[in-house]
Amino acid sequence: MRQFLIVVASVVLFIVSLPPASAQIPEEKKTDTDRTNPFLNSESSEQLDLLQRYYQRIFSQQGKSSLSRLGTESQNDPARFFSQAQAIGMEGPINPAEYVVGPFDLLTIIVWGIAPFNYTGPVTPEGALLIPTVGELAVAGNTLAEAKEQIRQAVRKKYTAGDISVNLVSLRTFKVTVAGAVANPGAYTVSPVDRVDRVVYLANLAATPQAPPVDQNRESSMVTFRTPETKPAPAISLRNIKLYRGHRDTVDVDLVRYYAGGETRFNPYLRDGDVVFVPAENLAGNRVSIYGGVRMPGAFEFHPGDSLQTLLKIAQGPTALADLEKVEVARFLPDGRQVQILTVNLLSGQNGHSPDMALQPNDRVFIRENPELRKERTVSVKGAVSRPGEYAIVHGQTMLSDIIGQAGGFTPEASIAEAKLIRNYDNPDELQSNPDYARLVDIRLTDLKPEDRQYFNYETAIKRGFVAVDFLKLFNHHNEAADVPLRDGDEIYVPLLRHTVNVFGQVINPGYVTYVEGMDHRYYLERAGGLSKEADRGKVRILKRDTKAWMEPGDTKIEPGDEIFVSRKARRPASVFLSATRDILQTATGLATVVLLIIQVQK
């Protein structure tokens, strides 16, 4: 038993004495796990901005553009702003059918004839127009078209001959009241060509309080004043503004719909005595939203009467890829927790009428897109073809040979053997396109040995999306089985034929040597000046132009574009030989010990 234990101990001693085979494991592990990868981050993506905010910005820009034309004095003086508004210019000629005549409008009446009559006068505060020799006419409250006809009829009774013209020559100003969540509620002077949005913007300008005057009788060291702070303008509703008019008429003002589609009925002209009520914006539990195949997806404040078609208009309409046959509306049930999905076909209308559906607060509309619909699929052809450039393809049907034919075929200088088909995959995950991230994902569950993992990293670093295609078999030997269908984004590269052989490494004069048919590697080495003193004659290799395979000289024929590499003799320091000698002696000693023990046991 004692002898058996001696044998076991000797074997263990022998194994321990062997040199370690995995000395590089810590370094390799550090390379894979501790390398900093800037692409692996946890930044959150930007949230989808509310569509409501977009229209808030439009509202603000509209007001600023009006103020910028009047100068800083008018910007700080609302009354002066509106008194100068008439000089800015109007949206266009006044529509007599829409303009309502009121006190202090200035009218001119001309009778063209043998006895001409010319009169210019204002409408009185009581709403009447006093025309000499004609009389008093109550015109206030009538449209301009109605007032003109009324005046012509009255003047015609006095002047029976000649043409009669009635014109509005100057606009009046009047007061309207703005109330609600605006920064500066109160009365404002406006004109009949001002719409609701202008007075709302002015009333919502940030209020800047004035600093108290400095007391000159007190020491300056005893007086301190805080810098005046600008009070931020509150978030106001743009969709639920109320315009109260005389006779208890109420007009709904929806500035979002006005800015989205230019429908003036949602932003009417102001009239004498109007009261504009602007509530605060309320998006919590009172919004509608639309996502997917629209030009401007987002969410905004709900307005009574909203429908799918309204939502599409505000979102600037569907995209070309939108699937309007299956529009989904997610609606909360009365319990406020469960959701019901309603499907609407917006293409099922008849007689030119698009189907519609009334919306409720908190409805969410989803319009799916078909990414394959009307998608422009192209491939690019570069290099030695007659007509390089971009070409349209049909997915899964257009073949490689078809595109080469459309490109006019190869030029005489084309190196068909070196041609490549490169496929670029479009991955929605941006990290997947990063080679470091892809390598880490692929190697995460590996059981490769350290040396195999190091080689895997090397191959991953030079990997590209090459499609395995034998161009020579397809185009020179007309083997249709070698043809492949093309995909969107493919690149076809055909390099020029190189009539040289590149000789490099341990030669006297490395460089390109003109190709000569039938010559072997020795000819090209001689043309490159021969081998150097440091050349390793046993390690001359041929690097093939097409496959990039390393071949020994006797195993291949030299072709144009091939490369010849001459390696260098290995020069190892003395320490390497000493280490190797030590390892050999340790191994021999261990073996001798085992043999002696075995002999002792046999005795």
Image: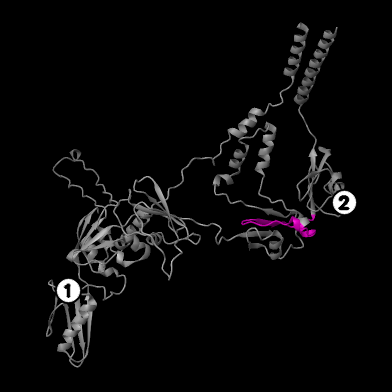
Q: Which mark is residue 111?
A: none
Question: Under tag 2, what secondary structure?
Answer: loop
Relative to 345, is 108 above or below? below
Q: Position of residue 416 (x, y in %)?
A: 76, 57
Choose between 237 and 339: the one closer to the eye. 339
Q: The C terminus appears in which quarter of the rendering? A: top right
Tell me what residue is drawn at x 71 percent, y 66 percent.
Answer: 408
Q: Is residue 472 left or right of residue 328?
A: right
Q: From which residue to which does the magenta span run?
A: 474-499
Q: Quadrant of the N terminus?
A: top right
The amino acid type found where label 1 is placed reads Ala
Whether residue 127 appears in this view of the structure is: yes
Give the percent coordinates (x, y) of residue 190.
Answer: 22, 65
- Front disc: 2 or 1: 1
The residue wearing badge 2 is 519
Q: Quadrant of residue 581?
A: top right
Could you tell me which secondary element the residue under label 1 belongs to?
loop
Is residue 485 inside the magenta stretch?
yes
Q: Which residue is mark 1?
A: 140
- Magenta stretch containing residue 358, yes or no? no
Disc 2 versus disc 1: distance between alpha carbons?
108 Å
Q: Mark 2 is on which residue type?
A: Met
Please, is residue 16 above or below residue 247 in the view? above
